[in-house]
Each structure stands twice: as structure tokens, then as C-alpha cells.
């Protein structure tokens, strides 16, 4: 296969030692393993071959819903979009204005533990009511947003299925 620049592209596999940073998700902490990546040796463009992208996004969403640290702004945006909710709809469901949700999603306003929990429960309810109740019953295990560390989400393709690594 040829790159847009006309040079030949070389296929390599993303491994656990050299994972692919999946920025197309809008997140800066999702790394994929066991996928093919086409790389142009001339202009350095990378083109990942990502099978079953819907299933991949389900696994990412589940990792985010389960993580024991507070959600980041980009994670809230990813979850909202994954659930198929418009910003106005999510804002209404969690009891804030659309402009407040915009500030949360753009990192202009700190994410409170209650807002974090409401976003998780609302997104989970779109997919699974029992999962939403589990989130709402959860004890306050979340670290304060001011001390948030970005958890790395390692997701790999095993036997034609996306699987979250143990850290999710």
C-alpha cells in the first residue's frame, strides 16, 4: 500500500512493548495492542487498522466507568458521545446547564465527585440499568480531581475480541 506522499507503507504490529496510542478516541491515555499499523517510512504518517471499533469503544467506556479515579474532561466527552447523548441532553439529565457541561468537558471547571458519579450513572443507564445502580451505590473511592493521575488504559485484541488489561 502507498502513502499519500507516494512512498511505500510498511505494516507493523502494535505490541505490549510498543503499543499504539489511540488518540482518535479523543483520549490521551488509550493504548492498543495486537493491531496492525501501516507506517510511511518517508513522511512518518501512521494508519492503524482497527477492527470492530464499536466493540473497542464499549471496552474503553467500561474501563472509564470502572476506574477508581475521577473522570477527566475528555473522558466525560468520550462517555457522552459513546452513549449517543447530545450535550444538552446529558446536561439536562445531570441537572446542569449546557454551558456548565461544556466547561466540564473542556477542563475549564473542576469535576466534582457528584458530577462524576452522575455522568457515570447516566451513561451506564443508557447501556444497562443494573450497571447504573452499581455506580450510584459505590462508595466514594474516587480520588479528588485536583490530585488526578491519568490512568493508562491498555486494551488489546485477543482472538478477534477487544479485551481490557488488568488495569481497567
Image (cartoon, helix red, strand yellow):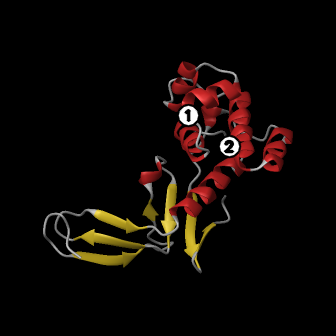
Question: Where, quadrant-wise, is the C terminus in this rendering?
Answer: bottom right
Q: Nearer the viewer, residue 6 or 149?
A: 6
Mark earlier in primary sequence (1, 2) = 2
Q: Nearer the viewer, residue 59 or 144?
A: 59
- In space, the residues marked 1 and 2 are separated at their CA atoms by 25 Å
Residue 141 percent coordinates (x, y): 78, 41
Q: Which mark is residue 69?
A: 2
Q: Is residue 65 left or right of residue 158?
A: right
Judging by the rendered image, the residue that carries numbered circle 1 is 86
Vertical relation: 73 (above or below) 13 = above
SS under mark 2: loop
Vertical relation: 11 (above or below) 79 = below
Question: Where, quadrant-wise, is the N terminus in this rendering?
Answer: bottom left
Residue 8 percent coordinates (x, y): 18, 75
Q: Nearer the viewer, residue 149 or 109?
A: 109
Residue 94 percent coordinates (x, y): 70, 27
Residue 65 percent coordinates (x, y): 69, 48
Q: Are marks 1 and 2 in contact (CB under 8 Å)?
A: no
Vertical relation: 47 (above or below) 85 = below
Please name the residue shown 44% across and 70% down the image.
Answer: 18
SS under mark 1: loop
Q: Is residue 46 left or right of residue 155?
A: left
Amino acid at each position: 500500500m502507498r502513502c499519500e506522499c507516494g512512498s511505500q507503507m510498511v505494516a507493523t504490529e502494535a505490541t505490549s512493548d510498543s503499543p499504539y496510542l489511540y488518540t482518535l478516541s479523543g483520549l490521551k491515555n488509550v493504548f492498543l495492542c495486537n493491531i496492525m499499523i501501516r507506517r510511511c517510512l518517508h513522511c512518518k504518517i501512521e494508519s492503524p487498522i482497527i477492527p470492530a471499533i464499536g466493540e473497542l469503544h464499549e471496552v474503553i467506556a467500561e474501563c472509564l466507568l470502572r476506574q477508581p479515579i475521577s473522570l477527566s474532561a475528555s473522558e466525560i466527552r468520550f462517555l457522552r458521545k459513546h452513549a449517543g447523548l447530545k450535550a444538552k441532553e446529558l446536561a439536562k439529565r445531570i441537572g446542569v446547564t449546557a454551558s456548565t457541561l461544556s466547561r466540564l468537558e473542556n477542563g475549564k471547571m473542576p469535576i466534582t465527585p457528584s458530577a462524576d458519579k452522575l455522568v457515570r450513572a447516566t451513561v451506564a443507564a443508557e447501556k444497562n440499568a443494573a450497571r447504573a445502580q452499581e455506580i450510584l451505590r459505590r462508595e466514594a473511592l474516587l480520588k479528588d480531581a485536583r490530585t488526578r493521575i491519568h490512568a493508562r488504559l491498555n486494551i488489546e485484541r485477543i482472538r478477534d475480541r477487544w479485551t481490557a488489561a488488568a488495569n481497567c
